[in-house]
């Protein structure tokens, strides 16, 4: 076994242990430790990705502990997992960097190291979700992710965030309760906890034609559980408060990483536990499809009505999660690839929008109202450019990442025609127009000049990139990530395709 | 005959009913403490389900004391292990929820989540 194959294990352990060590470190050192550890894990994941891409092994299984397959615990890594781990590290690093200044204002100094415990634990849990090959381990790490995310929301102490954290926890716990029940029932049906062994048993059960109703209920429980946790349309009530009032790094991490970790687990369940042919034949995907379409429309409409810019960006997340589940609902491999690409595109864009949005509200005397943002793009030029790029990407303008995913969704709907084709195309068009309305409206607003007298009266100020070098660097890096996803989408799609083939 | 299996597996049926009760409590109760009680009922129902599935009538707990290593003697130990892990998870989640409840109660002197939301809207924070 090549040494590089230890990377998944090392990354999870490194993230977990640095979280534990952060509890006794002062805030500043904990911050640096977080930066170093995340960079290291990112580099190691890139190494693993290159290794797996060049070699012909495709994917491999890493035995945890000293017990072989049916009894022990396993980690499994392929190109898709390594790519996801790399991407999560990049977004995590940039999100934490972008909200750096804001955290000093919003979090008590004595609690700064706690923030990095949470981010490290979150990263470790997300990596474990990406790599694990064991369903019960996945459940445990889903719960760790939930607890860490709840901490990230409530670390900014005011009534709003605590209420948002409580609502987040309640919905998440309902979701994980359903997921746990589903996993337990699946264990009873198959007698295994490892994904590959489960799939063998599931195939046998399917071929024998027995237990069809329990199987359907099991899949339904797990799917609905994860849909609730990742805020699919009818279950999204907790989302705007949780993303809208937490500190900006938390909002960026929650929207771009936490929900994506759960969705990645769902993809693994579809491909590696149940088998995609069976999933595509069941009616579960129709439900996901309809809810996804509903989310695409409803999230955008709510965003148009919203006058608070942070909540507007949050409602846009509901719409984008709808896109992802709509892609699942198409029930084809092309739809799945489009969804996975949209996971990347949305994560890169939404964290950019949150980080840029905070720069705009800061120079507008902290007011989050849409009307106070007039001319904010001139007061903080870097944030203005970042927000404009993010908006264009979300709307789907070419060369940005959002365009590629919309193109892929439309292609996936047309290539394999079914009754789903017309609803997909129509809703995609409507949703794009709605996106354009609220995002471009905001971009126009921030580039409408405000008179100097009004600016002075309201206490607005100007800030150049030299006064906020780290922030400017973060925005530029986010834009670069967005452009990389938008321009070099072909190799990334190859990786996704190869990874999905290895899944089955 | 329909319902025959239901009677044989009444333990699982009870677990499912309890799960439903806990789920509904967690979702619909206004009082935060009652929500947490619902959460615990829901989790306990899952453990009952697992224990019920792992137990085989007439067999012993899987602890070797008298040198008998035959598989036929013992029950399946894995569900018990899963229950233990699940208990750890649910204890930590419950602790977190209770601490959040204490925070909210100190601020707003009520346990009614809807009333807290209404007051937050009035504050306009």
Image: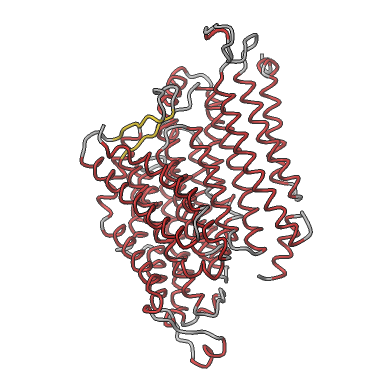
- Residue A286, percent across and down? 49, 41
**From this viewpoint, is residue A114 visible?**
yes
- Residue A458, percent across and down? 57, 86
Between residue A135 and residue B89, name the one nearer to us: B89
- Residue A7, percent across and down? 33, 41
Query: In the figure, is residue B100 to the left or right of A311?
Result: right
Query: In the figure, is residue A77 to the left or right of A457?
Result: left
Task: Give the image's coloring scheme.
Answer: secondary structure
| Residue at the limit of the structure toward the bottom, as seen here | A453
Between residue B88 and residue A289, name the one nearer to us: B88
Residue drawn 51% across the image and 19% down it: A210
Task: Write down the quadrant of residue A489 in the picture.
Answer: bottom left
Q: Relative to A477, say whether B23 is above or below.
A: above
Residue drawn 49% across the image and 37% down it: A138
Task: Write down the quadrant of residue A110 in the picture.
Answer: bottom right
- Residue A345, percent across and down? 38, 56
Q: Relative to A37, say whether B21 is above or below.
A: above
């Amino acid at each position: 076994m090549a040494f590089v194959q230890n990377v998944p294990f090392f990354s999870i352990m490194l993230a977990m242990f640095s979280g534990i060590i952060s509890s006794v470190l002062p805030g500043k050192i904990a911050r640096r430790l977080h930066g170093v550890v995340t960079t290291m894990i990112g580099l190691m994941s890139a190494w693993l990705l290159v290794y797996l891409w060049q070699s012909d092994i495709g994917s491999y299984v890493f035995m945890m502990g000293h017990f072989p397959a049916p009894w022990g615990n396993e980690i499994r890594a392929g190109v898709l997992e390594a790519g996801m781990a790399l991407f999560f590290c990049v977004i995590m690093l940039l999100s934490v960097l972008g909200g750096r200044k804001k955290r000093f204002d919003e979090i008590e100094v004595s609690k700064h190291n706690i923030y990095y415990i949470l981010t490290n634990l979150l990263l470790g849990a997300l990596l474990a979700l990406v790599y694990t090959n064991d369903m019960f381990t996945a459940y445990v790490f889903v719960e760790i992710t939930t607890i860490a995310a709840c901490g990230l929301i409530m670390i900014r102490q005011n009534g709003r965030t605590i209420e948002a954290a409580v609502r987040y926890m309640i919905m998440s716990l309902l979701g994980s309760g359903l997921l746990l029940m589903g996993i337990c029932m699946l264990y009873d049906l198959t007698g295994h906890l490892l994904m590959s062994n489960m799939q063998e048993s599931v195939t046998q059960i399917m071929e024998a034609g027995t237990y069809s109703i329990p199987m359907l209920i099991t899949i339904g429980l797990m799917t609905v559980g994860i849909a609730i946790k990742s805020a699919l349309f009818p279950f999204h009530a907790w989302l705007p408060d949780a993303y809208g009032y937490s500190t900006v790094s938390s909002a960026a991490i929650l929207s771009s990483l936490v929900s994506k970790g759960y969705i990645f687990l769902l993809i693994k369940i579809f491909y590696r536990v149940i088998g995609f042919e069976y999933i595509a034949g069941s009616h579960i995907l129709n439900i996901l499809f309809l809810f996804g379409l509903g989310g695409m429309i409803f999230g955008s409409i709510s965003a148009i009505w919203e006058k608070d810019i942070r909540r507007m960006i949050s409602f846009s997340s509901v719409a984008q999660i709808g896109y992802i589940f709509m892609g699942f609902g198409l029930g084809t491999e092309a739809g799945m690839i489009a969804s996975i690409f949209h996971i990347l595109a949305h994560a890169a864009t939404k964290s950019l929008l949150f980080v840029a949005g905070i720069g705009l509200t800061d120079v507008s005397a902290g007011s989050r109202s849409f009307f106070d943002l007039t001319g904010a793009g001139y007061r903080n030029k870097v944030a203005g450019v970042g927000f404009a790029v993010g908006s264009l990407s979300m709307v789907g303008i070419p060369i940005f990442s959002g365009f590629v995913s919309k193109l892929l969704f439309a292609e996936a709907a047309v290539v394999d025609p079914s009754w789903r084709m017309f609803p997909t195309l129509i809703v995609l068009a409507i949703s794009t127009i709605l996106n354009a309305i609220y995002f471009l409206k905001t971009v126009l607003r921030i580039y409408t000049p405000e008179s100097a007298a009004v600016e002075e009266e309201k206490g607005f100020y100007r800030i150049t990139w030299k006064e906020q070098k780290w922030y400017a660097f973060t925005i530029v890096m986010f834009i670069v990530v967005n452009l990389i996803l938008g321009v070099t989408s072909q190799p990334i799609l190859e990786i996704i395709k190869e990874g999905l083939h290895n899944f089955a | 005959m329909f319902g025959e299996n239901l009677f044989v597996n009444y333990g699982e049926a009870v677990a499912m009913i309890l799960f439903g009760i806990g789920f509904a409590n967690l979702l619909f109760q206004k009082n935060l403490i009652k929500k947490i009680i619902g959460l615990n009922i829901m989790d306990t129902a899952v453990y009952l389900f697992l224990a019920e599935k792992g137990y085989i009538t007439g067999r012993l707990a899987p602890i070797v004391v008298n040198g008998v290593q035959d598989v036929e003697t013992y029950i399946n130990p894995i569900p018990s292990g899963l229950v233990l892990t699940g208990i750890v998870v649910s204890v930590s989640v419950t602790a977190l929820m209770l601490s959040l409840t204490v925070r909210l109660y100190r601020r707003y002197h009520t346990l009614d989540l809807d009333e807290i939301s209404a007051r937050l809207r009035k504050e306009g924070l």
